[in-house]
Amino acid sequence: MMRPWILIGLGAFGVLFVAGVLITALPSRRAAAEQEACKNNLKDLAFFATVHAHPDAAPGVAVKHEIPAGTIPLPGVAPDERLSWVVAALPSLDQRRQKTKEILALIDAAQPWSFAGNQDAAKRKLPGLLCPGRPPELASDQPAPTQYVGIAGLGTDAAMLNFVPPGAASPRAGCFRYDAATPFSSITDGLSQSLLFGERWEDLGPWLRGGPATLRGLNDGADAKPLIGSQFGGNHPNASNWAMADGSIRVFSPRVDPKVLYSLATIAGKEQEVIPGE
């Protein structure tokens, strides 16, 4: 902290100069802290999805070596009417930030997301799913959204791609699929080269709802919105945070070539070169 006698020595102009510097620095520091907190949220989600490969990190969890399914299985029910992967992730999130036990007690996994009891759970805000840099306004009578979504691959239909033959991923497939888990053995591009979660600002959906609300492919169509700042990102100045399948976090700016993220969105695109973040 600046000593009072130093401020006296600086005079009025000096005091105004120092005050200006502090005022300018504070927003920058706050933005940096918010982005770091956002990265920590993504790390928690990545831990949930990769804990299957690290049983020592969660005692009693069987080794499955796979990314869990993007929705809770419910025969005969469309993906966007099922419950999302977030239900399975809840026990892995910071228990001090949300009342997980209360929320889980409200959820009936044998019912679609629109079931009355599930709607009560859906209205509960989950701080771990909201970016502190630009959290959305929440209406108490509406389902609470998530700003983090699982990456399904390349294309708006990526989450519905099947592995044919079994174990061999489509060139457009990503880490998450609606109907089934994704074995680590199918991620031939490498865990550190495969996008797992991305942050969003626009077109948010309820955290409890399956389908595009919580799972999306990168849209590379001719009519697609900008990849950074619209499809994804938008919460931090000139930066977007992404979690990779190995649990690491990468940051990309709007200047990144979309082809880089398109390549990282797929798990069997045969990319050979390591693609660094910015």
Image (spheres, rainbow, N blue to C red):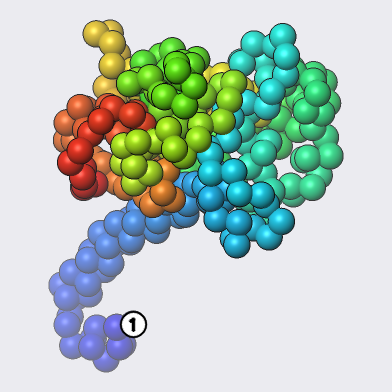
The residue shown at (35%, 53%) is 31
Q: Is residue 36 left or right of residue 41?
A: left
The residue shown at (61%, 16%) is 79
Residue 48 shows in the view:
no
- In this view, the residue in front, 57 or 130, is 57
Q: Which residue is mark 1?
A: 1
Which image quarter is the N terminus in?
bottom left
- In this view, the residue in front, 32 or 12, is 32
Q: Position of residue 9 (x, y in %)?
A: 18, 88
The residue shown at (72%, 19%) is 74
Q: Position of residue 85 (x, y in %)?
A: 61, 32
Q: Is residue 160 left or right of residue 85?
A: left
In the image, residue 208 sits, relative to residue 62, either above or below, namely: above
Q: Is residue 197 left or right of residue 231?
A: right
Residue 184 shows in the view:
yes
Q: Amino acid at mark 1?
A: Met
